[in-house]
Image (cartoon, rainbow, N blue to C red):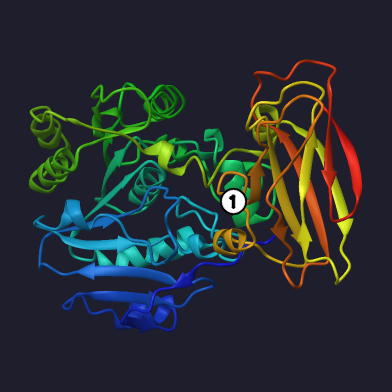
Amino acid sequence: MRMPRRAVKNLSFKEFSSVEEFRRHWDSKSSSAISIEDKLPIHLHWTNRQAENTVICFSAASSKVREVPFWTGRGVTSALDANVLLVSDPSMILDRTLSLGWYAGSLEQPDLIETLTEVFRVVSQGTRPIFFGASAGGWAALKYAARLDGAVAVAVNPQVDIARYKYFPYYLRKAWKTEDGSECLPFEGNVARDYAEGNDTSVVYVQNEGDSHHFIEHFTTFKSTCGNPDKLIELLPDLGPGHVAPTKESLIQILETTIASRSASELRTNLSCIEIKSSGVNNEVKVSGSSFRSSEALNRRYPVLLEKKYNLSPSIRVCTVGIKSPVHLLAKAYAIEVHFDGVEIEKAIARKLGLSWSAGLHCAFFYSQEAPGRAWTTYDSFRIPEAATGVHIVVRQWRQEGLGENRKDSVHLYCKFDSFQIEA
């Protein structure tokens, strides 16, 4: 089921019809929101401070993005002695459930990396570009810094090989319409290889030691591959378990120090004096709902026990689902997905129909209620969208406790007067 695209905010953009027009007519003197027409629109926000450095900010993943552009970095850059370019990932417009795209492009915009590289080259002309981002934005900071002479990357808990990250399969499906893996993409997903041949870019790599996945799977990969260790500055604070970022104040200190330092050796010395404090926030928790996992991992954790599809006559506008178990059934034993043929459903519509919405499952759903043994338990009815021609029910095992082996629970879909069994 294809989800609607994100809408574009009603902002006052300085508009360019192409990247070529932007290159020819870009004027850095005024600060403004910028829209560059491409296969997908490129949205930027430029702040000119007539400085010698230009900080280019990329966003991490977020499940709360309703419209584009989605810019982050205003807070940490507001007082810097630097020009600032905020960059919204064009791929975020593709699907409302897509929470990250690494600024790596899509099937609709396969040459995004080349395109943005040219944009950044134009914007940072005559200044030193400093690319800044965390997590998925950290990958982008590393990727683009490697492509511009004299650049610096400040990457915080970045992914290095995006194919090793659990949200990558979902990005593949939504952005590239494939599940074939990273080898099918027109770019190198392991950004460490961009630095393997002694790239002269200075890298400030901030990695929380308590984030075991990013430390082992990503940081060690980058460190072992980096061909110019003199340009790699490692900052390895212990910020607590999980994908925990430094405080805003710590990030500001890191950026201020990077701006003030003129060489890699000076930067290394100056950064060694900074105490990096923990924000205490596991940023991965925020996105786990919307960019859940690969379908294989999801099905392993919450196995599909039953799927049924039914055609709906125009007269059927309400469905009710009931469950009967031979033994006492705990609440939330099952999650029941509800899909409709011929209609695209989003969160607001699901609620109007009397259903909940799962950003993790990317569909309308409800949990099974507690049910006494051998008795039917019925649920609040959900309405059928007017244009729906069919309903597709998917029953997942949601919790393990209380579900013994070789039991058979029954599900009844009242709109069809039909019942079927779950093999639990």
Picture quadrant where residue 318 is located: bottom right
Screen quadrant of the C terminus: top right
With 141 as the anchor, is 369 left or right in this view?
right
Point out residue 39 in the picture as x, y percentages from the top left corner: 54, 72
Which residue lies at the image location 71% right of the left edge and 42% below the top edge? Answer: 336
Q: Is residue 341 above or below residue 104?
A: below
With 129 as the anchor, is 116 left or right in this view?
right
Q: Is residue 279 above or below residue 121?
A: above
Which residue lies at the image location 49% right of the left edge and 60% below the top edge? Answer: 92
Q: Secondary structure at mark 1?
A: strand
Q: Is residue 337 above or below residue 311?
A: above
Picture quadrant where residue 66 is located: bottom left
Q: Nearer the viewer, residue 316 or 147?
A: 316
Q: Residues within 10 Å of mark 1 (few under 14, many from 20)?
A: some
Q: Mark 1 = which residue?
A: 356
Point out residue 391 in the picture as x, y percentages from the top left corner: 80, 57
Which residue lies at the image location 74% right of the left edge and 64% below the top edge? Answer: 384
Amino acid type at image mark 1: Ser
Which residue lies at the image location 78% right of the left edge and 67% below the top edge? Answer: 388
Point out residue 362 in the picture as x, y percentages from the top left corner: 61, 50
Q: Nearer the viewer, residue 255 or 118?
A: 255
Picture quadrant where residue 57 is located: bottom left
With 417 as the anchor, is 290 left or right in this view?
left
Point out residue 156 in the picture as x, y percentages from the top left corner: 30, 38
